[in-house]
């Protein structure tokens, strides 16, 4: 392509082109390293059955080398498809998704040569690991679409985890614990809202400090009360999974999506609600207006800071609910810093997903799946040292934000405090 | 003098408030205090004595310990020396974050850069045999290069592809942590005859000399950190490069129009920021913790952000903030050991101090103050900066 043609491309087109080039490089890498380089293949067993769902295929045994080759070629075909769509001026979303799945499968076939891979379990675990990320990213959407940067997701998650775990233990009632998780998250948000919106303090700084505050508070109380008086303060038991009749019997999909705890079902509702409300309701329109152009929004009579205040509180509530997943959705009891940086990964998913609810969900699912895959392969053993497997999701994120997402555009007024009458601090 | 007083009024009050609020936390979470629910007066007294003894331990562990001083007066200052030891790497990582802030970048990656520097310094420190002084310089140089490249890569990515530094640095922190775990399992980094992740100690020829005799751990690293602070002050306020950095930080679009290469500024700033954090790693390894372990990074990178925020992004402020946090860190250990007050209280105090400082309006309202210097509020650039 000559330089003049390059110049004629718009910014999103250039980004898309760079994405296609990155995908092409990765596809060729898969072809060479996963398919051609290994001397001989070994059988890989993919199992598709987890519980008592109806059985469609039980397992699929395939030679690792031929499977890696097949999926590598599929990924390269996806790149060709992407190129064609790009030339035709269309988006390349579908081709990118096909590419991602084929590339991962090619890698998996290579890494699991001679091993047994519980495929359904892998996806189910991946969904579970992405639950807090999805809640966290939704909290980000709510707050940032209205123009308030929410770095405090980590703190909101941790507060929700702590309060739900402790209250469920003290009151011997998981439902009360679950009820108070969003309230705990919203309390952290209240601090964010008051200082950021009322006093106009820098939101990134504030969010960071709130994280430190919550980590400090919960860790302090954990050591001071939860460890010495464990039976009273920290003995909550996780919710049992609920099988949804019929749906949970669907092969592969059933056990992944419809045999989960109440918190996962709440997550489906929250995501669907936020997606629809953000793009179809009056509230959604106002939220986006306030996040993009607060002065214009105010000129038609919208109270900018009131909308922001409410959204930030709701954001905290959603993240707090997600925090309950760490305790009541998984292990029951609380442990020190149990969110382990998940709030920051949720933030990455939010940006990766370009501040759209469904984009953020997709990104969170990728992170969760990669995390689970890494855990599985560390146990089964792979040709790569486990530390590099652990690094993979983070390196993949860096490649993705620099290759595919590139210069992201946040809501235009995100992070800028608003003063009535069209000024900013 | 009046100006100076007005400058420190706010931080001092913020610190007092933070101690007060944390003190309440210590008291109400104490089982002895809770047991006295029936008699409010004795409960209050117990609360005061609980919080009081925690803070007295904090002081004994960070400034001066009368018990230690009984035998040898100088040894009474052992805690102060520990404060200096804890503060030195914090000054450097804090400067790393502060410098990036001034250039409009939020460097969450000081943790990873610190680890990169520690790996570099450790390897040169134990692997090579070099004469004294030269060995230290070589180890420090290795740390600067490793961490500088690690940080510079972030700036380069941002300049070339627009990848946001917050995301990239968060990811690189994890990458550095796992890389450290891996490299500690490779043969050059294993101690002969050992299998656990513990590198050999760096050679004596590479270590930084102690400042006040061998009993106290305070070492030359503190002066290196102070020197770096002066250097960054000069860079930011007296050099052309620093002017460009600040210009880009203040308004990237205007700087571009004025002919400043924003991309080059971003890459350079992140290189220097990385090198500073890496220098922190080198000071830690060559000064106080000679063997590289998986936990070498501690929370230096995380605390660095609070230090830079408290120091409002200025080199002098960062030094004072790091000294305060170093004191809390050193004292917190004593407090945890002697009064069963968890070390995590320090995090609460730190967060509250920064929160109160960031919100001058709140402190002014509580203490009904009018004319105090609020200083320059630190502002990040958000996502679109």
Image (cartoon, grey):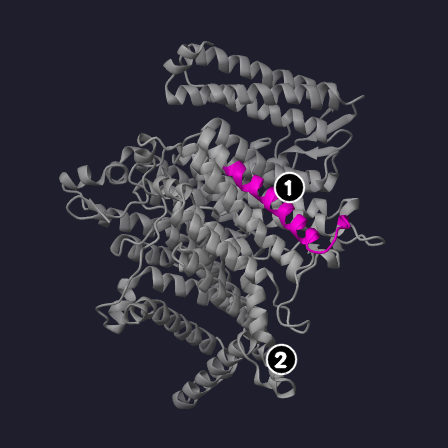
Residue A281: x and y in percent read 26, 36
Above or below, A182 relative to B45: above
> Can see residue A173?
no
Q: Judging from the image, what secondary structure is the residue with disc 2 in?
A: helix
Whether residue B220 can be seen here: yes
Magenta span of residues: B127-154
Q: Is residue B208 above or below residue A141?
A: below
* Residue B137 magenta-highlighted: yes
Q: Chain of mark 2?
A: B
Residue A310 place in picture, x, y as percent:
28, 50
Residue designated by label 1: A390
- Of the two numbered discs 1 and 2 in the rendering, the one whose residue sits closer to the viewer: 2
Nearer-the-camera pick, B137 or A398:
B137
- Corner quadrant of residue A236: bottom right
Chain at numbered mark 1: A
Q: Do pointers 1 and 2 mark residues of a single chain? A: no
Q: Secondary structure at mark 1?
A: helix
Question: CA separation, marks 1 and 2?
Answer: 45 Å
Q: Are marks 1 and 2 in contact (CB under 8 Å)?
A: no
Horizontally, residue A283 falls left or right of residue A52, namely: left
> Dot 1, how many residues are within 10 Å of its Cα: few (below 14), some (14-19), or many (20+)?
many
Residue at x 47%, y 9% (from the top left corner): A1
| B155 in the magenta segment | no
x and y, in percent, of residue B6 in the image:
29, 69
Residue drawn 73% across the image and 57% down it:
B205
Mark 2, residue position: B75
């Amino acid at each position: 392509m000559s330089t003049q043609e390059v110049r004629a491309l718009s910014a999103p087109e250039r980004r898309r082109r760079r994405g296609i080039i990155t995908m092409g490089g990765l596809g060729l890498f898969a072809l060479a390293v996963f398919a051609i380089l290994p001397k001989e293949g070994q059988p890989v067993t993919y199992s598709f059955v987890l519980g008592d769902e109806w059985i469609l295929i039980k397992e699929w045994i395939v030679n690792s080398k031929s499977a890696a080759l097949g999926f590598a070629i599929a990924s390269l075909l996806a790149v060709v498809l992407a190129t064609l769509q790009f030339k035709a001026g269309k988006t390349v979303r579908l081709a990118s998704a096909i590419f991602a799945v084929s590339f991962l499968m090619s890698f998996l076939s290579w890494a699991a040569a001679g091993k047994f891979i519980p495929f359904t379990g892998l996806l189910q675990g991946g969904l579970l690991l992405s639950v807090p990320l999805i809640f966290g990213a939704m909290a980000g959407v709510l707050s940032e679409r209205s123009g308030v940067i929410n770095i405090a997701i980590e703190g909101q998650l941790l507060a929700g985890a702590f309060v739900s775990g402790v209250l469920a233990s003290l009151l011997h009632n998981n439902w009360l614990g679950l009820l108070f998780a969003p309230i705990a998250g919203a309390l952290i948000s209240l601090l964010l809202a008051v200082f950021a919106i009322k006093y106009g303090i820098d939101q990134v700084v504030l969010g960071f400090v709130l994280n430190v505050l919550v980590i400090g508070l919960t860790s302090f109380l954990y050591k001071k009360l939860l460890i010495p008086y464990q039976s009273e303060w920290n003995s909550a038991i996780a919710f049992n999974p609920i099988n949804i009749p019929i749906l949970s019997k669907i092969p592969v999909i059933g056990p992944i999506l419809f045999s989960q705890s109440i918190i996962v079902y709440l997550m489906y509702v929250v995501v669907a609600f936020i997606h629809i409300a953000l793009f179809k309701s009056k509230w959604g329109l106002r939220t986006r207006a306030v996040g993009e152009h607060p002065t214009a929004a105010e000129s038609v009579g919208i109270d900018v800071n009131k909308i922001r205040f409410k959204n930030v509180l709701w954001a905290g509530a959603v993240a707090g609910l997600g925090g309950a997943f760490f305790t009541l959705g998984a292990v029951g009891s609380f442990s020190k810093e149990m969110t382990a940086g998940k709030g920051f990964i949720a933030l990455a998913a939010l940006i990766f997903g370009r501040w759209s609810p469904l984009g953020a969900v997709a990104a969170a699912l990728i992170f969760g799946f990669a995390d689970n895959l890494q855990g599985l392969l560390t146990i089964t053993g792979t040709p790569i040292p486990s530390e590099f497997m652990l690094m993979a999701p983070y390196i993949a994120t860096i490649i993705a934000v620099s290759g595919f997402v590139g210069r992201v555009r946040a809501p235009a007024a995100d992070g800028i405090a608003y003063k009535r009458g069209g000024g900013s601090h | 003098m009046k100006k100076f007083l007005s400058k420190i009024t706010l931080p001092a009050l913020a610190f007092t408030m933070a101690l007060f609020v944390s003190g309440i936390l210590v008291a109400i979470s104490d089982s002895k205090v809770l047991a006295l629910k029936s008699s409010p007066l004795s409960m209050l007294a117990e609360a005061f004595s609980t919080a009081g003894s925690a803070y007295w331990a904090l002081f004994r562990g960070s400034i001066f310990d009368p018990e230690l001083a009984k035998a040898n007066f100088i040894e009474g200052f052992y805690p102060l020396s520990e404060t200096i030891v804890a503060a030195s790497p914090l000054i450097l990582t804090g400067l790393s974050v502060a410098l990036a802030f001034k250039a409009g970048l939020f460097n969450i990656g000081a943790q990873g850069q610190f680890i990169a520097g520690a790996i570099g310094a450790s390897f040169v420190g134990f692997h090579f045999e070099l004469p004294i002084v030269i060995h230290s310089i070589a180890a420090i140089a290795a740390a600067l290069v490793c961490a500088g490249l690690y940080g510079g890569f972030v700036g380069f990515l941002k300049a070339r592809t627009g990848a946001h530094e917050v995301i990239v640095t968060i990811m690189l922190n994890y990458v550095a942590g796992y890389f450290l775990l891996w490299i500690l399992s490779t043969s050059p980094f294993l101690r002969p005859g050992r299998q656990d992740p513990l590198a050999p100690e760096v050679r004596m020829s590479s270590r930084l000399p102690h400042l006040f005799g061998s009993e106290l751990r305070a070492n030359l690293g503190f002066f290196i950190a102070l020197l770096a602070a002066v250097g960054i002050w000069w860079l930011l306020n007296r050099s052309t490069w620093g002017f460009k950095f600040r210009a880009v930080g203040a308004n990237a679009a205007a700087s571009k129009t004025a002919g400043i290469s924003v991309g080059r500024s971003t890459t350079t700033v992140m290189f220097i920021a990385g090198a500073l954090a890496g220098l922190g790693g080198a000071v830690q390894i060559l000064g106080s913790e000679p063997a590289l372990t998986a936990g070498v990074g501690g929370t230096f990178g995380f605390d660095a952000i609070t230090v830079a925020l408290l120091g409002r992004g200025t080199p002098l402020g960062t030094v004072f903030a790091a000294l305060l946090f170093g004191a809390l860190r050193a004292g917190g250990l004593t407090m945890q050991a002697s009064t069963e007050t968890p070390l995590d209280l320090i995090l609460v105090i730190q967060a509250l101090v920064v929160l109160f400082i960031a919100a001058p309006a709140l402190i002014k309202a509580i203490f009904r103050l009018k004319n105090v210097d609020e200083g320059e509020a630190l502002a990040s650039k958000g996502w679109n900066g």
